[in-house]
Image (spheres, rainbow, N blue to C red):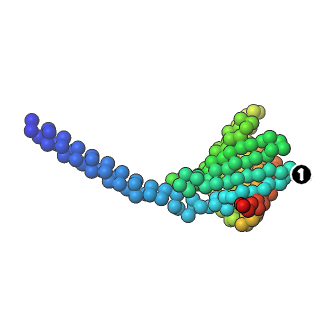
Amino acid sequence: MRYRPLLFNVVLIFCLSVAFQTVSSQADSTDKPCSAPEASQFDFWIGKWDLTWGDSLKGTNIITKELDGCVIHEHFSDPKERFYGRSYSVYNPTKKLWQQTWVDNQGNYMNFKGGFENGKMTLSRSFVGPKGKTVMQRMIFSNISDSSLDWSWESSLDGGKNWKQLWLIHYKKAPEKLSN
């Protein structure tokens, strides 16, 4: 009868020891949760941007890095068309890819995943359309410099063999306003 409490205490001490080591190692790894070099791949997008597309359409996009530097937050605005959207992007080190969620004032919700390669950031998604056909969509950030970039919205109906550009937006850094 005396062995049962002793065995229980040994098992309890072992479990607590394992739990403490697990919590300790997690605390060490979360001191700087977004410190991996890949977590800075989207930093080129941070800032206030003036946007142009088509013949005369214009908008703005304000991109911030938030939540201890782990989240890229987008504030898209097209006042002429009254179209406004927000996105949140994070680098997922477990999956080794970027993930983005987009929502807007037209009730759209879209989720993307992708990464930075060969000087371009590409995020994509796929879904089954109303006619039962798989639709692939992607956005590509290219021609990236400190003061400008291009963003392309593309779609494919044949599994990614052919892509059709639906929207091309040119980004130019907005001039910084001087304060009095």
- Pick the front one: 177 or 170: 177
State the residue at coordinates (14%, 38%). 4
* Residue 35 left/right relative to 48: left
- Pick the front one: 84 or 155: 84
- Percent coordinates x, y for residue 65 in the rendering: 61, 55
Q: Which residue is mark 1?
A: 56
Helix, strand or loop at label 1? It is loop
- Pick the front one: 117 or 104: 104
Is residue 51 visible from the viewing direction of this image? yes
- Percent coordinates x, y for residue 21 in the rendering: 32, 53
* Residue 24 left/right relative to 63: left
User: In the rendered image, which quarter contains the C terminus?
Assistant: bottom right
Q: Residue furthest front?
A: 180
Q: Amino acid at mark 1?
A: Ser
- Pick the front one: 43 or 62: 62
- Percent coordinates x, y for residue 33 in the rendering: 49, 56
- Percent coordinates x, y for residue 137 in the rendering: 73, 47
Q: Residue furthest left?
A: 2
State the residue at coordinates (71%, 35%). 107
Badge 1 crowding class, 10 Å Cα cut-off, few under 14, some 14 to 19, many 20 or more, is: few
State the residue at coordinates (24%, 48%). 14
The correct choice, above or below, for 29 with respect to 85 in the image is below
Is residue 173 visible from the viewing direction of this image? no
User: In the rendered image, which quarter contains the N terminus?
Assistant: top left
